[in-house]
Structure formats: structure tokens, C-alpha cells
Image (cartoon, grey):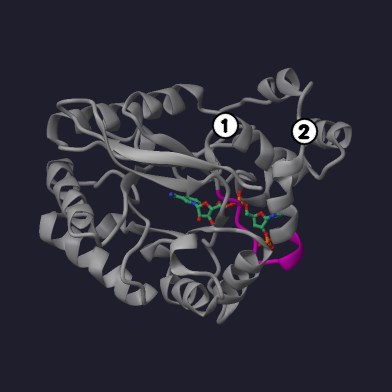
Amino acid sequence: MVEDVTIGHSNVLTGKRESEIKMPRLGLGVWQMIGEGECKSAVSHALNSGYRLIDTARAYSNEQETGEAVIESDLPREEIFVVTKLRRVEAVGYEETIAQCKSSLEKLGLEYMDLYLVHAPPEDIEARPNVWKGMEECLALGLTRSIGVSNYGAHHLDEMRSYATVLPSINQIEIHVLNQRPALCAATRAIGAIPMGYSPLARGQKILVDERLKKIADSAGCTPAQAAIKWVYDTGAIVIPKSSNPERIEENLASIEINLAGSEEAIASMEEGYVSGWNPTIEH
Ligand SMILES: NC(=O)c1ccc[n+]([C@@H]2O[C@H](COP(=O)([O-])OP(=O)(O)OC[C@H]3O[C@@H](n4cnc5c(N)ncnc54)[C@H](OP(=O)(O)O)[C@@H]3O)[C@@H](O)[C@H]2O)c1
């Protein structure tokens, strides 16, 4: 069974954790599910298979299908953890942030979301404090049960101490065997947040054909994808592999049963700082 992790927001002044909630540590990512019905059918299949966490974003253009699958499932709403994100180009100010959160809820067809993330550090540095104030207001209004960030580097997180009332519960960043990011995970935990690893399969390219990972997977009796996903899970991060394929959706969930004991050194040696997509964590 997928474990839960407790997430919450540390008060910047007192350091006290506020408004704690539980979040599943493995979920389905739905980026690039843009064919008609593709996202809805993948989310429905994932929910039927045992997934309880879905990661979408305004930028993925599939909040509506995600919400439809959530609403039409037999599961009570409170058993499903829905994440969406404030698009970077719309992360420009306080009012805009609240308006975008409400607009995402409308597209999802839901009364609340479970986690709202700033998709990447707002390009306008001056706007960052007001955007975060807007995120805090979304939390206070009950539009979302928690708030966090994505693609924030250690310096972005540190800066938040100067303008936040509560710090993020999550920092969603690229994490996989070829880009293990121990320093950024530590910086994330240092502000009381949990790392959420995206692209655990490096977008399905380099990792899945890596001979070293194939060997590790063979010795653990699993597929390379399962070894890659389970490694992220074993670091204590939340992991959100994407698949539109029913068999692979199930295969990825079954990765939590895999035992990678004995492969720690072999996996550690795979680190090469490989970035499969964008990397706003290093921007100003
Ligand atoms: N915050 C951000 O900036 C950010 C950036 C990137 C991603 N994300 C989130 O993280 C999620 C996952 O990352 P990702 O979509 O970049 O890539 P990923 O999960 O690393 O890889 C997805 C690719 O791997 C394939 N795949 C999935 N399971 C497989 C398996 N068991 N065997 C072989 N191939 C498999 C998929 O194809 P099929 O669909 O055909 O199975 C797809 O091509 C996204 O969907 C999104 O929710 C967030």
C-alpha cells in the first residue's frame, strides 16, 4: 500500500507546523495527456487501480478531464488528493493568484483542491512576495488544503523567509536516479517542506534504456521503470510517474512492493546531474 506523509506549513516566526494534512507518497502525473479523453481515462484507471494522488496543472490543459474522473469515480472526494499549479505566466500578483486558483477549481469542477503549487518561481522577482501572499489567502479561504512551490532552488526557498507568513508544504522538483538532488532535498526539508519528485523516469528517455539500471532491476526482479520509481519513493520523497497506458499505470504503482536493498551504491553511482526538461531552480 502507498504510504502517506504528513505535510504542513511552518510558521516563519515561530517555526511551528500549521494545518497538517496527510498526502499519499505516490501518484499519477498527467502532463502531456492532451488527446481527447486521454487524461480522464488514465485518471479513472489509476483511481480504480489504487492511486489516490493526481498531479495536474493549469499549463497541462487537462484540469477539466482530471476533475471529471475524480467526480465520476466511486471514491469519496476526501479520499483523493488533487494537486494543481499556478501557471508561471499568471504568477504576477496577489489578486491574480487568487483568481487563478478559483478558475482552476472551476475547471476541475471541485469545491477545493488539496494542494496548490506555484509552478515555478515567478519571473518577476518583485512579484514573488505578493504571489505567495495570494497563495496564503487561497489557503485561508479554504480553496486549497495546502500550498507549496515547484522548481524552487535553495536560494528561492531561503528568500521566502523574508516575505512568507507560512512556508510551503511541498517543493516539487525533478528527481530521478540520474539527478538525485540531495542538497535541494535537504534545503526543502530545512524549511519544513517535503520534496515531491517529478519526471522519475526522466520523461521516459535516458533512464529506461540505461544498462546499469537494467542490471539493478534484474537483481530486484522488477522492470527498470519500477526500480527508478521505487528509488525516489525510498528517499522519502513523493513520486508522480506519468503514464497514459493502463498496464504501465499498474506497473508503476506496483513499484512500491520492490526491494532495492543491496543496490544503494550502484544507484548512487548513477548520479550525473542530468536534467530532462527545464530547470528554473538555478534562475535568479
Ligand atoms: N512541476 C514541474 O515543472 C513538472 C515538470 C515535469 C513533470 N511534472 C509532473 O511529473 C509527472 C511525471 O513526469 P513526466 O511526465 O515528465 O515524466 P516521467 O513520469 O518521468 O515519464 C513519463 C514517460 O515515461 C513513459 N512511461 C511511464 N511508465 C512507464 C513504464 N512503466 N515503462 C516504460 N515507459 C513508461 C510514459 O509513456 P506512456 O504514457 O506511454 O506510458 C511517458 O512517455 C508529470 O506528468 C507532471 O505531473 C512536473
Contact between marks 1 and 2 (CB within 8 A): the answer is no
Range of magenta residues:
240-248
Q: Is residue 176 left or right of residue 184?
A: right
Which residue bears the numbered disc 1?
Answer: 179
Q: Residue 187 in the image: state x and y as whole percent.
A: 38, 24
Q: Residue 245 in the image: state x and y as whole percent.
A: 70, 66
Foreground mark, 1 or 2, reads 2
Which residue is at a point 30% across and 39% down the rendered structure image? 168
Residue 156 drawn in magenta? no
Query: Would residue 80 be visible to someone looking at this image?
Result: no
Tag 2: amino acid: Asn
From the image, give the main secondary structure of the stretch colored magenta: loop
Q: Nearer the viewer, residue 151 or 138?
A: 138
Specify the quadrant of the image occupied by residue 156.
top left
Q: Is residue 187 left or right of residue 75?
A: left
Query: Would residue 203 be visible to someone looking at this image?
Result: yes
Which residue bears the numbered disc 2?
Answer: 259
